[in-house]
Every structure is written in structure tokens, then in C-alpha cells.
Image: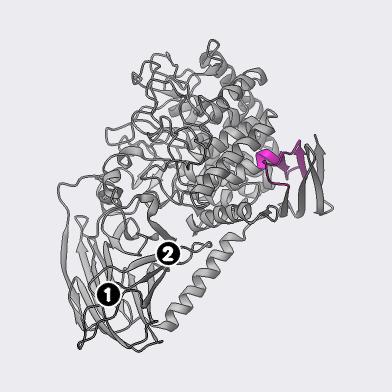
Amino acid sequence: MDDAYSVQTTAAETAEADGLEQLMALKDADTFCVADQWGDLKGGADGLFDNDTRLLSRLVLTVGGARPSRLSSGVSQDNVFFSAHTTNRPLPPMGGRSAPAGVLHIERRRFVWSRRLFERIRLHNHGTEDVLVPVALDYGADFADIFQVRGTPRAKRGEIAPATHDGRRVTFAYRGLDDVERTSCLAFSEPPARISGSRAEFMFSLPTGRQVDLYIECGPDRCDTPDEARFRRSAVEAQLAMRRRRRRGASVRGPRSPRFNDWLDQSRADVALLTTDLPTGPYPYAGVPWFSTPFGRDGIITAWQMLWLDPSLARGVLTYLAKRQATEVSAFQDSAPGKIMHETRGGEMSALGEVPFGLYYGGVDTTCLFVALAGAYARRTGDLETIRALWPNLIAATQWMTDYGDIRKDGLISYQRGADTGLSNQGWKDSEDSIFHRDGRFPKGPVALLEVQGYAYSAWQAMADLALALGEPGHERWAARAETVRSLVEDRFWMEDEGFYAIALDGDGEACRSIASNAGHLLFTGLPSPERARRVTKRLLSSEFRSGWGVRTLATGQARFNPMSYHDGSVWPHDTAMAAAGMARYGERRAVALLLGEIYAAAAHFHLRLPELFCGFERAPGEAPIAYPVACLPQAWAAGSVFLMLQAALGVNIDALSGVVEIDDPVLPAGIERLNVTGLQVGPGTIDLAFQQMGAHTVALTRRRSDDVTVRISG
């Protein structure tokens, strides 16, 4: 994903004990909670976070002085609730009697809503005798900035005040070096028998067959006493809000096979979980736990993946990013007029400038992608009113591409970080070792990445098309600029002996001849000639790239290939999806169905929730894909990958400006005999589509269609 600056090192150590893939995540707006499978927060990578600050770093439940035995746990399919079911170990003698193990059912049920963590601990006595149950909760709040949690060291930090408590609540406070006081409050529905700044102890008398509930809340402000009514009311509100997000746009349903539908439902729910309704519209945050904030590149690509089904995400992303477009030059922020934001953060370290990511622009591709998405959104929706409102931002973005993005004045977009505190590599593969020459040498800057030139090509094309649609000048100039970029890429990046494109050009104009998946993104933009696209596709589908679980980021045999790396041999679902969509542009639909099947198989091993990435080891019969230990889970563009690949496989192309839906040579993945798309909005009209496997061919049918929508089916 993004921001590899510290995730690969100390964050791995932070999460190693439990495995980040085992953490259970809940999120609402700018508040999220990650806990282990028992529901405990233990101060590693887990905790309750609000606006990039950890409000609760420890919350550990013991019953009878011991951690309960776990029966099962997980997050509900709609991503609203976490539940852990456990049972007691032998309880200590109370009044001469002790209870054996396994007589108590202990359930923790939790959700996050309106900047608060809500939890219910329910104890049910299934034994034959009444019991006294000692319950304890150990807690703490370190107010660590998200970058501290990820491993960025701080020489100094503010002061944590001693925790204060009354009969049912504990209040924590911290005054940061930015002179901002941050607080959190932990409250209980029942008064503890003993309470301190770090521990609450309860004693419950529990007759046989009876149950008792303890309600807990934690948030950034003083909380009232929790109770069942507020727990239930807030839970309903959280469910309804999630339901609204999940039901935006069209619906895709597979055959009666519940597994495939469950994957679609889980992916849609993960996108909905990560989407925050901002004043500018819905925005998909990048991922939990490290990237639960707006990212430019991630938001754009996720919105693009979902564009054919739910254009509202694209509109929200474009509007939000336009309002944060840079207006000045700053080396520390890596900004220049017209540039589109890479990342924004709200914590203390960002506010103090200890890290540059409060509002950071160090992504070389985001500005081009912003313009390209605007063009795709206009074509998909026909919403020229929004595009007209964004037109000054689009003009400013293209001005940045010309004045600042083209550092070497050679017609290509290049990057070189403005300050040592920023990202050294500024494409989507932004880890320090991701861009290199064939012999492993790192290139001198400025660096021109392959896929970024494709994004620029799409941006210039979009501007040409939008100028025509809006009646604005510049169509010929921008169309010519697109063709100039195409010619430059074909001339300077193509390696005839390899039948492939170089990953980058270094500051001397020398090609970095590494063989990497970036070429798949170039296919996505439609820049290569058909013959070269065919050769690239053939290689991307070879065993060099295909692990059996998707496309590796780097071909085997390359100088820095490592299947356990972040960007040099791992598999990223979104990367595979973009390559697949690129292949589809050149008619390779069966290849798309093949890759979709592989990603589906990987998802099945990850409980149908695709992580940000996983290791690129070759698929072995009967074995699962190997997890990357600190991958975000859930992650937006991983969740959105299935929808982009489905669109590519089905050959669906929507032009709302013309009121036309084209379906070109659709193909369903192996084992999926039918697929229905309902409620697909095209301008003011809607259509329902059905795809059915008939022998060796997939047939597309229109089930319902508004009079103002034309459907053209070919292949």
C-alpha cells in the first residue's frame, strides 16, 4: 500500500506476538479499535484510536484471576460488531467452594460508534451450582501517536497526568508538546468492588442458569454511566449507518453458491467500513490499523474500482482532494501549487512537524490519477455539474504536471523528495528498496516511474475529453500532449530484448531494467500498442509473476526478489486487479477470469477478507497463501479489487454521457455459472443485467432497462 517508511521494521516487531492478521478491527469515522481474538487490548499494535491518538492502550479481562479459554471470536459480516465467546478456567474457592472450568459462558460484544467504544460483557452460569465470579479489568491510556505505535521514535513527549477515578469511571489525561490536552474516559455500568487508575475489580453472585451484564464505554470525553438502553440504541444507529453505506450503488450477486456471494458481501462491507462520510461526501480511508485516514492515491484507486457500481465514492474523493490541493511550495510537505494530497494526519507528531504527514503531498502519481479519475467519473455518470465545479482544480493539477511534475523538462513526470523526512520513493511502491536497476543498484533522481507516465497519459486524455464536454478550450493541446507521452514511453521504457517495459528511468535517463508488475498498471491506462500489450500480458501470466494466488509485484529472478518483501515479490490484490483490468482493455478476458479465480481462492483462505498484501510464494497443493505479518486488514483497495476484476471480466463499459452501456465478450470465472447486476444507474436511468454461462460462452441479458439507456452486447 502506502507509507512503507516504518511499517516494515518496528511495526513488525510490535505486531509479531499476536500477528497483525489476527487483530480484530472495528471503525467508525476517525475512531477505530483493534484487539486480539479475546477482545483484549495489550498495548502492541492494538488499542482504541481517535484522530491518530491512542485513547486506550490496555483493556484486559480476567475471570477468577485467569484469562478465559477462547471458544470462538470474530467480526460480524457487516463489520459492526466484534464478539468473543470464552469460558472460565477453574475459579478460586469462594466460601469453601470452587467452580470447575467450563461452567461459565463469557461473551464480549463490542462496537464503535460516534467516537466511542461500547462493550457488553455477559456472564452466564451453565453450572449446577450458584457461583461467585471475580472479574477484573486492567486498563491504561498511553496517548501514543499512531506514528509512535508504528515505531517512529520520539526523543521527548508530553506529560501523562495520573488517572483519576470515582465510583464507576476512570479519566485519563495527557498534555502534549503541542499544548493540547487529550483525554479519555472509561466507564462501567456497575460500581467495581475496587477501582484504581489501572484496574477495576468486580464480584458477581451468579445463581445457576442466570446471567449478568456489565456495560463499558470509552471515549475522548467524560462519559455518563453506561446502560443497556444506550448500548442497544447506539448499536442500532451503528447498524443503520453501515447498512446505508453498504447499499450505495448497484448490487452484484453470484449464483446460489453462498461462498462467492459471501466474498462479495465481505468485500462490500469492508469498503463500507473504511468509508467515512465527510462534509465533502463519502471517502474510503486506506486501511486499519496503520492507514485509517484519507490517502490520495488509495482513495482514488478504491473509488475507481467501485466506479461502475457506486460513483458516489469518486465524487466524494474528488471533492475532498480538490479542497486540499496545494497552493504553495514546501520542501517539508513536498508540495507545490496544483499538487494533490498524498496523506493527512491529525495526531500530535504531525501537528508538531515531527513527521510531515499532517498534510503531505509526497506522491508523484496522485495528481495525475486525480485528473484521470475526474475523466472516468464524468464518462461514467454524465455529472458535468461536478466536473465544472472542479474545473479550476483540474487546470491547476495539469499546471503542476507541466511546471513541477516534469522536473527534467523531458515530457515525463518525475519525482525527487523535497526533504529527507519525506518518502524516498513516491509511487505506490514507496518502500525504500522498491525501485532499482537490474543489478540491484538504487537509481539517482529524479526518477520517472513507468506507471506514472500511464496515469499522465490518462490525465491528458481526460482533459481533452472534458474540455469538449464542457465547451472549454484546450482539447487539441491536451490530446496532443497525451500522444507525446505515449510516444515517449514507447521509445524510452520499452525493452525489446525483454518484451517488457522498464520499471523507471533514473536521473541520467538510464532505464531501470527490473521486471516488475508496474507494467500491468500501464496496460490499465491503455497506453501500450496492442502488440506490446500482448507481450507484456504473456509475461505477467507466466510463472515469473503468477504465484497461483495472483500476480507478484516483482518477477522471480530479479536482483531484489523476495516473496516476503513489501514490494519486491509479494502479491497485492489491487495490483493484480489493475493488471487484470489492463489485460481486459486488450481483449484478454479469459486471463482476467483466471486471475479473478486465483484471488478468490486466496480470499477463501483469509476468511474472505483480502489483506493489503500477502507473500509471493508459489502456490502448493493443499496449502494456504502465506500471510504478510503487518498487512492492513481490512484495506480499501484490496477489498475493492474483486469489483474491478468483475467489471473487467464481464466487459462492462458505461458511458452515461451518451446513455450507452457496452458489454464486450463477457467471461465468468470458473465455477461461477451466473451473475446478476441490479440497480445499475446510468444517468437518470437504471438497468439490471444478468450473465449466464452457456457451454463455453457467457451470455449477457438485460433484465430491466430505462428507455433512455442503450445496451450494446458483443462477443
Q: Quadrant of the C terminus?
A: top right
Which residue is most to the top?
497
Q: Residues within 10 Å of mark 1 (few under 14, many from 20)?
A: some
Mark 1: secondary structure:
loop
At horizontal 53% and vertical 61% (from top left) the residue drawn is 77
Displayed quadrant of residue 48: bottom left
In three-dimensional space, the C-alpha distance between marks 2 and 1, rounded to whole angstroms, equals 19 Å
Give x and y (percent) for residue 506. 40, 18
The quadrant of the image that shows the N terminus is: top left
Q: Is residue 474 visible?
A: no
Percent x, y of residue 142 = 22, 60
183 left or right, relative to 686? left
Residue 671 painted magenta: yes
Q: Is residue 116 visible?
A: yes
**What range of the chain is rendered magenta?**
647-673
Task: Identify residue type, mark 1.
Answer: Pro
Along the horizontal axis of the image, is 605 left or right of 120? Answer: right
Which quadrant of the view contains residue 34? bottom left
Residue type indicated by callout 2: Ser
